[in-house]
Image (cartoon, helix red, strand yellow):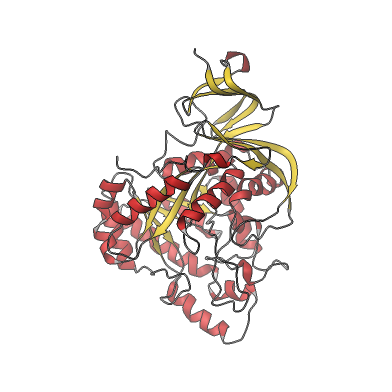
Amino acid sequence: MSQADLVIRNARVVRHDGEFHGGVAVKDGKIIMTGANSALPKGHREIDAGGRVLMPGVIDPHCHLGVKYPYAEDMRTETAAAASGGVTTALLYIRNLKPSYLPFYEERKAVGEENSIIDFGFHFGIQREEHIAEIPEIVAKTGVRSFKCYFGYEPDNPIGIVPATDGWVYAAMRILAKIPGGLINVHCENTQIASWLKNEIKATGRQDLGAYTESRPAFCEVETIRRMIFLAERTGCSLHLVHTSVGMGPVLAAEAQARGVHVTVETCQHYLTRTAYDSDLDMRAKISPPLRDKEEQEGLWRGVLNGSVYSLGTDHVPFLPKKLEDLWSELPGVVSFPWELSLMLHFGVHQRGLPLSRLVQLNSANPARRFGLWPRKGNIEVGFDADMVLVDLDEERTVEHTGKGTCIYEGWKLKGWPVLTVARGAVLYENGAVDESQFGRGRCLSVPA
């Protein structure tokens, strides 16, 4: 075999289906060999992993970039932050208020590729009726097969999201059910009940974070999850429940799966590590859906450990600094890219015994399969893109936030950190720094078939 571009040896290589001791050889951005150290070819660059864990790069299937800061700027700052956290692919939920997504897609794809350091793709938000009728053309001309409907937002919400109706969901589901790989993602909260309760609690003058959670209680999310599963079963559409914050979410999904419904559950690191009643949190930790209580958190961990939670996503959104003036008009959202892997290593692997192979399923293999990236992304195997992260399970480091957006982990000491990130064979992050010469190397994965 000819010389490889990059060879990583002496690693504990962990995949979704097991692990081995050895390494990986890379050429032209692809994995060309895996196996024992002695079987690997020589490389132009060789890295001794020192027995540390090598796993597939994290695929973060849920983020929002270009919402309050310029899109081009976010595609540089935030994808660099992602690379520092072991993320090699990010999928953006993006919204367009104009009648057609096609010009919007061309612009976002071009600007993204000019600036991003990692590969990226899109899910499109349904924001007007025309978007539903356009779905077949969008699929044909952009390759995007994943669409999102938003509940839980009133028409005058501070982000400008156009809330969905059941009619929109049903109409989109009927179309997507006929499209190979077609998928609807739903933000599940009963908008009308949450609005009624918000007005009741707002009238009391409360400004604590718990007031926001109590204004849109867990049953609002459970009710809408049940409704969306019913519609998915009725139409035969594939359903993905994004940023699930309630313990019943994975339970209901597992019950539906047993009936043959194709439904999967995503949760986020903040729901697994924070509650609305943590004493150090205030309105800065406003997130949509909200942080919940310990009982809901434990329910989500049960789903993570037993397999009924399918994947993880950060819902990373870099908003302008929060004003801390009024809970009810504050923008919801936090940033998590640099710490998403470390949070799961610390709280999942070290504290709860989460197997590393299960973490790879949640972070890499399952998102790749769900969003049409398999067998290109999500595994350390011959023929896959050489997207990998080297992890030091024993390194302890304190969370420091210097970028945009709100961090709710500042000062936490976490055990387990990424020390090297490789994307399509290029080393993007090592020795605590991102290689800024790699900006513009990322490629859009949402392209016509």
Q: Please tell me which residue lies in front, 222 or 181.
A: 181
Q: Position of residue 417 (x, y in %)?
A: 68, 42
Q: Is residue 342 above or below residue 41?
A: below
The residue located at (65%, 64%) in the rendering is: 275
Mark count: 0
Which image quarter: residue 422?
top right
- Can the viewer see residue 310 in this picture? no
Which image quarter: residue 326?
bottom right
Q: Residue furthest front?
A: 437
The residue located at (58%, 14%) in the rendering is: 39
In this rendering, would 282 be left or right of 314? right
Q: Please tell me which residue lies in front, 427 or 177.
A: 427
Q: Please tell me which residue lies in front, 362 or 52.
A: 52
Q: Please tell me which residue lies in front, 276 or 434.
A: 434
- Can the viewer see residue 349 in this picture? yes
Q: Position of residue 330 (x, y in %)?
A: 56, 73
Q: Quadrant of the C terminus?
A: top left
Q: Is residue 132 above or below residue 376?
A: below
The residue located at (62%, 59%) in the rendering is: 297
Q: Position of residue 401 (x, y in %)?
A: 67, 56
In this rendering, would 37 be left or right of 140? right
The residue located at (57%, 20%) in the rendering is: 44
Q: Position of residue 58 (x, y in %)?
A: 54, 42
